[in-house]
Amino acid sequence: MPGRGSAGLGLAVLTFGTGPAALAQEQPVPIILGFPSSVQAAGLAGAGVGLPGYAGAIFVNPAGIAPIRVLSLEAGFSRQPDHSTYAMAAGATRVGTVNIGGGYRYLRFSADSATFDNLSAVAGAVLRRGGIALGASGKYVSVEQRDGPITRSLTTDLALQIAFFDIAAIAASLQNVGQVSLTGAGLELPTSFHLGASLNLLDTYSNGRLLATVETAWSSGEHGRTTVGLEAGGVLSGIGIVARAGTGPQPGLAGGLLSRTTFGGSLVLGRARADYAFQRRSALGRNVHLFGVRWTP
C-alpha cells in the first residue's frame, strides 16, 4: 500500500494540472471511486459498465471480466511535479468455470490539498453459464487526511451481465452495497445502480471498428444520469487505430470535477492496446492527458 513519499509502478500516464483542494469532511468522500474504470472508459466519458472483456471492468462491473478466456492485464502510473500521483493496476483470469480478478487504484493529492490520498482495492469472482454472468466483488477503500486521520471501510458490488457473442452486451451493476467501517465514522459511499450496454455496429472480424455504448446510473441523493459514447476506426493485419468520444453528466462522488465530454483513441497492436484519453478537467486539475496499455492474450 503506498504511503507518504512512495510511488507506484505501471504502464499508463496521467498528466494533471494544478487542481482544487479536497476538503476534509466528517465522512470523507473517496473521489477515486468516481474515476473511470479504464483509459478506454475515460475516453467515453466514464461509460464503462457495458464494456466487458478487460481487467479494468472489475472496478465498476465485476461480471465484466467473464469473457476473459486466459488473462487480461492493465496498469497505470503518474507522478506530477507537485507530487500528485495516480496509479492503478488490474488483472483477471479464468479458472475452470469461474473468472477471478482484482485491481488497485491509488490517488495522492498535491500538497495544497486537505486530503493526502485515496486508495481502493478490489477482488471479485464471476460465475458464468453461456452468455450469462453473475459477479460479485469486495472493495477496500481508504481516505487519509493530511496531518489527520485515515478512514477505512469495506463495501461490495454486485453485477449481472448478458453477452451476445462479440456483438453486444448488457450489464447491470449495483455498487457500494453496505459498508463496514474499519476505522473512523466510515466513508461517504452512496449506493448506485448502473445499467450499461454496448453494441458493435460492425463485424469485429472485419477491418472496421464501430462501437456504441450507453450507461444510465441512479445514485442515492442524485437524479439519474445517462452517458453515451462512440468509437470508430480500422484494423488491418492486427494493427490499427480507433478514435472515441463520450458525453454525459458525471458522478457526484467525483465532486462534480470530471469533464462532461471526453475524447480518446487507441493504437491496436495485436492483442495489446495503447490507449489515450483527454479530460478538460478532473479532480486534480485541468487538461488531463491519460495514456494506458491493456493486454489480453
Image: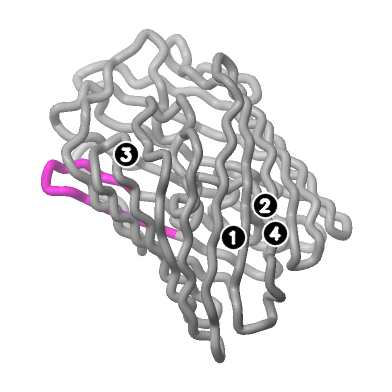
**What residue would you read off at disc 3?**
282
Q: Mark 4 points at which residue?
A: 199
Identify the residue position indicated by label 2 in the image: 64
Looking at the image, do the residues carrying marks 3 and 1 touch, with CB atoms under 8 Å apart? no
As shown in the figure, which amino acid type bears the numbered disc 2?
Gly
The question of residue 78 being in magenta is answered with yes
Inter-mark Cα distance, 4 to 1? 16 Å
- Asked which quadrant contains residue 165, the reply is bottom right
* Any part of residue 38 in sight: no
Q: Magenta stretch? A: 75-86
Disc 4 residue crowd, few under 14, some 14–19, many 20+, Cα 10 Å: some
Task: Examine the rendered structure and indicate whether residue 225 appears above or below residue 24.
Answer: below
Against 22, residue 43 (above or below) is below
Label 1 neighbourhood size at 10 Å, few (<14), some (14-19), many (20+)?
many
Q: Of callouts 3 and 2, which one flags the residue occurring earlier in the amino acid sequence?
A: 2
Q: Label 1 sits on what residue type? A: Tyr
State the SS at label 4.
strand
